[in-house]
């Protein structure tokens, strides 16, 4: 794989080998503790204030495209996610919805009602044959992501593919090849990749704000029926209004079942479980922030604890991952959790823990915490402090508990959101601007560890992954 085709998560910092990167992280940790301007501006610092707030901003970047520059957009898979993507995409100037494809007639009717005179069809190949379509959103169930994306790239269309990029790990290399051979723009839809929160976290990490990374964790919680994929079954759904064979596609044949098409995430033939739906977002963010290619060892556990509605996938899943030392980060461990039975619900975060501090990262916020303490490497100072504080009876000194210094970075009011920014970046790449942040190579490196969790869970084994060659070992 050529260097220029690697995604951001596989790109080494310029002019930096592993040793110089670690030295810069260590130096950055010291600087962060003593130079407030590194993180929070010259007016206040981590060591002088227990908490501070900073606003994350983005310069307005709305492109004013001439009507002749309008991009013709089509959506393949006009369900909830697909049409939400359309609504976001149409907020970008110079984009026009031309066509929609879905296997359920009711969704096509809804698309026409919402967007007027557009072409609708059950057959995605009719979309790809149209000259007025330059870009397509693939918002289908997971088992269709790779086949449609490959066909679209080969037809010369730019592709925005919802995550995870593939249904099975082994599908990834053919999609990477189609992207490279076609020269068309391909982007995976993990919207956090374009978020202000992730961007700030990456900046702080590379400045050494948390020292040497040693552990990371992520969590996603839900407890309501829709969040747990108990989607409503449309009243008008029937064998007459649904192209059942079109839905099944490469999946095994079986009789028509509305639960399988409208609650497809619950079934392994079409979905990828909580790992493919949610772990992949956390992997994308982590890999972006620390410029990682991925883990080498994957192990998962979990179970079906509450939503016993016939689904084939767990509603509680935990994953543990070993990341090797690379030129961009030391070796570290990652734990991820998804819980659809969480009584608190709605919680999601990614936490990076280092030798000098920690960061909680979301798409709209970063909380940086650093402990105020003597440098643990300064043994001489510690010994002298201990001698001075020692009691007459020889007992060890009683040390003082110090609160962590905290800086909270929050997006500015009116921020248009990571979804809009992600689509803006895709359209700008199509128009010849900067490359996308989540191409097929990055997408596979984020999807594969998530899908490997399913292998570990269902096959009750440890899975080994080569993040450089992007192959199971």
Image (cartoon, rainbow, N blue to C red):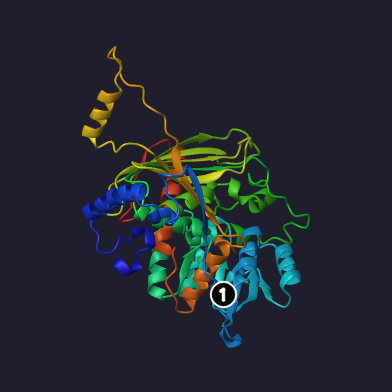
Q: Quadrant of residue 112?
A: bottom right
Q: Position of residue 252 (x, y in %)?
A: 55, 52
Q: For the point 35% across and 55% down, which residue is it?
A: 206
Q: Quadrant of residue 47?
A: top left
Q: Quadrant of residue 237?
A: bottom right
Q: For the point 67% across and 50% down, which residue is it?
A: 257
Please determine whether, in this image, residue 120 is positioned above or below residue 369: below
Quadrant for the N terminus in the image = bottom left
Please determine whether, in this image, residue 104 is positioned above or below residue 90: above
Please determine whether, in this image, residue 353 is positioned above or below residue 77: above
Q: Dot 1: what SS? A: loop
- Residue, disc 1: 62
Residue closer to the observer: 323 or 123: 323
The crowd level at tag 1 (other Cα within 10 Å; few <14, some 14-19, many 20+) is few
Q: Is residue 114 left or right of residue 290?
A: right
Residue closer to the observer: 48 or 157: 48
């Amino acid at each position: 794989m050529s260097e220029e085709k690697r995604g951001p998560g596989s790109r080494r910092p310029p002019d930096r080998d592993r040793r110089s990167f670690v030295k810069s992280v260590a130096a950055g940790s010291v600087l962060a503790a003593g130079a407030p301007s590194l993180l929070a501006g010259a007016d206040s610092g981590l060591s002088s204030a227990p908490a501070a707030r900073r606003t994350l901003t983005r310069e307005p970047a709305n492109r004013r495209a001439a009507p002749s520059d309008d991009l013709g957009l089509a959506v393949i898979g006009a369900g909830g996610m697909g049409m939400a993507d359309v609504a976001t995409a149409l907020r970008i100037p110079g984009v026009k919805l031309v066509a929609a494809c879905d296997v359920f007639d009711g969704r096509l009717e809804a698309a026409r009602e919402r967007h007027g005179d557009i072409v609708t069809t059950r057959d995605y190949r009719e979309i790809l044959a149209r000259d007025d379509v330059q870009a397509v959103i693939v918002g289908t169930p997971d088992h269709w992501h790779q086949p449609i994306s490959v066909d679209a790239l080969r037809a010369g269309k730019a592709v925005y593919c919802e995550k995870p990029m593939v249904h099975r790990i082994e599908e990834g290399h053919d999609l990477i090849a189609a992207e490279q051979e076609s020269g068309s723009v391909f982007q995976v839809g993990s919207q956090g990749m374009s978020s202000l929160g992730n961007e700030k976290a990456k900046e702080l990490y590379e400045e050494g704000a948390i020292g040497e990374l040693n552990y990371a964790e992520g969590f996603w919680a839900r407890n309501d029926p829709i969040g747990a994929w108990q989607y409503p079954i449309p009243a008008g759904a029937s064998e007459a209004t649904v192209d059942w064979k079109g839905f099944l596609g490469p999946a095994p044949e079986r009789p028509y079942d509305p639960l399988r098409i409208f609650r497809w995430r619950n079934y392994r033939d079409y979905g990828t479980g909580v790992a493919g739906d949610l772990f992949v977002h956390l992997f994308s963010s982590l890999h972006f922030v620390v410029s990682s290619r991925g883990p080498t060892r994957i192990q998962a556990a979990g179970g079906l604890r509450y939503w016993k509605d016939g689904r084939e996938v767990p509603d509680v899943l935990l994953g543990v991952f070993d990341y090797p030392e690379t030129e961009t980060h030391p070796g570290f461990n990652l734990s991820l959790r998804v819980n659809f039975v969480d009584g608190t619900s709605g919680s999601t975060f990614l936490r990076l823990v280092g030798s000098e501090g920690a960061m909680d990262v979301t798409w709209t916020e970063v909380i940086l915490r650093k402990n105020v303490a003597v440098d643990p490497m300064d043994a001489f100072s510690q010994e002298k402090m201990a001698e001075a504080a020692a009691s007459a009876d020889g007992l060890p000194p009683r040390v003082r508990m110090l609160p962590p210094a905290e800086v909270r970075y929050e997006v500015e009011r009116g921020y248009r959101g990571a979804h809009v920014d992600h689509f803006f970046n895709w359209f700008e790449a199509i128009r010849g601007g900067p490359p996308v942040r989540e191409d097929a190579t990055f997408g596979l490196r984020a999807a594969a560890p998530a899908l490997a969790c399913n292998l570990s869970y269902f096959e009750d084994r440890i899975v080994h992954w080569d993040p450089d060659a992007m192959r199971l070992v």
